Amino acid sequence: MEIVETMATCPECDAEIEVDEFDIDKGDQLTCPDCGSNLEVTSLAPLELDLADDEDDEDEDDEEDEEDELDDEDDLDDLEDEDDEDVEE
C-alpha cells in the first residue's frame, strides 16, 4: 500500500507540514514541528489546518474554578465554626 503524503501549511509560522492523508480525519489535532503550535484539521479537501483550542488552558481554568469553590466552602466552614464557639461561651 502506498503512503500518500499531503502538504499543509501551519497558520502560525507558514511552515509546510507533511501529513499522511489516509491517516488523518477532520478534527484531528497535530503539532507543528517548526513552531510547536497545536493545530486542528479543519478541512480534508483541500487539507487545511487551523490553530486548535488549547484544552490544557481550559482544564487549568476549570481546576482554578474548583479551587476557588473549595476555598469558599472552607471560608464558610470557618465562619460556622466561629459561630459555634460564640454560642458555647
Image (cartoon, rainbow, N blue to C red):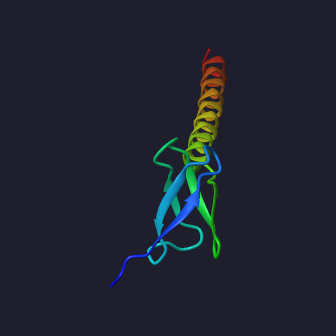
Pick out the residue farthest to the left.
1
Q: Nearer the viewer, residue 9 or 68?
A: 9
Is residue 82 placed above or below 36 in the rendered structure? above
Task: Find residue 74 and report its image quarter.
Answer: top right
Location of residue 46 in the rendering, given as x and y in whole percent from the top left corner: 65, 72
Q: How many marks?
A: 0
Is residue 12 placed above or below 8 in the rendered structure? above
Residue at image position (50%, 49%) is 32
Q: Nearer the viewer, residue 46 or 30?
A: 46
Pick out the residue farthest to the bottom.
1
Q: Nearer the viewer, residue 85 or 89?
A: 85
Quadrant the N terminus occupies: bottom left
Query: Is 72 placed left or right of 31 in the picture?
Result: right
Residue at image position (59%, 42%) is 57
Q: Nearer the viewer, residue 45 or 60?
A: 45
Quadrant the C terminus occupies: top right
Residue at image position (62%, 35%) is 73
